Image (cartoon, grey):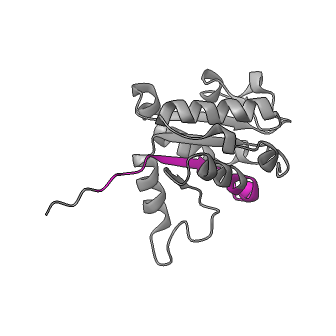
Amino acid sequence: MTEHQIKKPTLFISHATSDGEFANAVKQEIEKVFANGISVFCTSSPGAIPVGVDWLSDIEQKLGVAQAVIAIVTPVSIERPWLWFEIGATWSKGRSGDCKIYPLCAPEIELSNLPSPLDRLQALSMGKAADLKLLVDALIAQFGFGKISSFRASNITSRIP
């Protein structure tokens, strides 16, 4: 008997460790909207990388299969090399249409002043409920399912770093 297994789409949340609480708030809202129908990887989530696993290999593997990356851009993360590493690892996939990169910026980040190459992507502000809804709508359109009525922007905006 052949076993059929449906592979969930993967979304990767790129963020600085200091923005972990906020990244987890984004993860939780996305999981509600998609009723856990997508795999959301966030290194700050407990157990995201199993004990004893080579964490860099695990991150590379998750980036390799991700169809979407939310890059959380804050005054801290924008200075961290890991944000740029993770964006760079998926940039060519984004150019070929295999992965979408969604920059989600802290309110104090001027969207029009993002450094290259992020300035080439339409960015959103995490401080605006309408922008957060646009992000979720874009993910629903990309993955072809989801329930926007499950989304509560306030669950994210209340935890902005």
Residue placed farthest to the left in the image? 1
Query: Which residues lie in the magenta part?
Result: 5-24
Q: Residue at x 72, y 35 (%)?
A: 132
Q: Answer left or right for 66 relative to 161.
A: left
Q: Is residue 136 or residue 61 the one in the foreground?
A: 136
Identify the residue shown where x is 50% and y is 77%.
51
> In which quarter of the view is residue 58 placed?
bottom left
The quadrant of the picture occupied by the N terminus is: bottom left
Indicate left or right for 86 with 80 as reference.
left
Residue 17 lies in the magenta-colored region: yes
**Vertical relation: 112 (above or below) 100:** above
Work out whether 19 lies above or below 108.
below
Left or right position of 115 against 1:
right
Q: Nearer the viewer, residue 94 or 34?
A: 34
Q: Position of residue 79 (x, y in %)?
A: 72, 44
Q: Residue 118, located in which quarter of the rendered image? A: top right
Residue 97 visible somewhere in the drawing: yes
Q: Position of residue 144 (x, y in %)?
A: 47, 34
Image: 76 above or below 2: above
Whole-percent x, y for residue 127 in the image: 83, 37
Asked if residue 103 lies in the magenta stretch, the reply is no
The answer, for residue 82, to whether it is visible in the render is no
